[in-house]
Amino acid sequence: MKFLDRIIPFKISDFPEGSFYSVNLHNIQIDEVEEARSLLDAKTIQRSHKFILIEDQHHCIIVQASLKHCLSKFINSPPQKIILTKKSSGKPYVKNNPIHFNISHTRECAVLGFHPSLEIGLDIEKFRKLPDYFDVSKQFMHPEEIIKMKDAESPLHYFFSIWCIKEAFLKATEIDFDKLRDYCLVRTHVNIENDSKFTYEQTMICLYHKKIKSHKLAICIYDQK
């Protein structure tokens, strides 16, 4: 299938047990979309129709089909037979299988992450202008994180770094978004203006600024034991 050429594996030394893939979402062709649809169930295809723009519908189809294709390698099942179920938090999983996975995407690319035994959360963000970023920060940043953002060399870059970290943390731990402000993940000793690796309670979090071209990437692993 032609669309499978868009899926590129990459390694992250900080997570040797994890498996990671990027998916190129540039210039998707209609024949690739048709191929990808053949791997998906009717419910997933229907869900793609909630997007107004055709381009976004195509992105959804390619990303979901890429996920099914990669999952098939780990659970030894044809992509068409893999049924995803959602937890109460909305996070998808494969019933009766220990594999943990997560996805994140922008309009240009997607990242898929898999771990054999621990919960995983991913987020990618592309730096862009955001005039009201300070007001947005109050929705999910701890007051101490806001102070650090104000003091940063580039507050807007710092904003996107914390956003990326907190989104990955939320997706791994499945906490409520409204509670994110209660967690000061980026403490005094943590420098996120460069690539960083740190722990917070039962999680390990890594932030990369250049792992995915033009994007920040955050990965969070959560050990519930």
Image: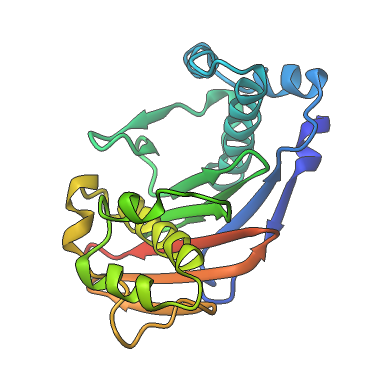
* Residue 120 seen anywhere in this rendered image of the structure: no
Task: Judge from the rendering whether residue 158 lies leftward or rightward of residue 135; answer left or right.
Answer: right
Q: Residue at x 78, y 24 (%)?
A: 32
Label total for image: 0
Q: Quadrant of the C terminus?
A: bottom left
Q: Is residue 10 above or below residue 88?
A: below
Q: Quadrant of the N terminus?
A: top right
Q: Nearest the camera: 150 or 58?
A: 150
Q: Nearest the camera: 11 or 74?
A: 11
Across and down, in percent, residue 106 comes to: 58, 42
Q: Residue at x 48, y 15 (%)?
A: 50
Task: Judge from the rendering whether residue 225 lies leftward or rightward of residue 210; answer left or right.
Answer: left
Q: Residue at x 41, y 50 (%)?
A: 100
Q: Residue at x 46, y 49 (%)?
A: 131
Task: Judge from the rendering whether residue 22 lies leftward or rightward of residue 150; answer left or right.
Answer: right
* Residue 21 seen anywhere in this rendered image of the structure: yes
> Of all residues shown, which one is farthest toward the bottom?
189
Across and down, in percent, residue 169 comes to: 34, 58
Q: Nearest the camera: 97 or 58?
A: 58
Across and down, in percent, residue 168 comes to: 40, 56
Across and down, in percent, residue 119 comes to: 35, 56
Q: Is residue 193 above or below residue 171?
A: below
Q: Quadrant of residue 172?
A: bottom left
> Of all residues shown, which one is farthest toward the front?
131
Q: Is residue 68 above or below residue 20?
A: above
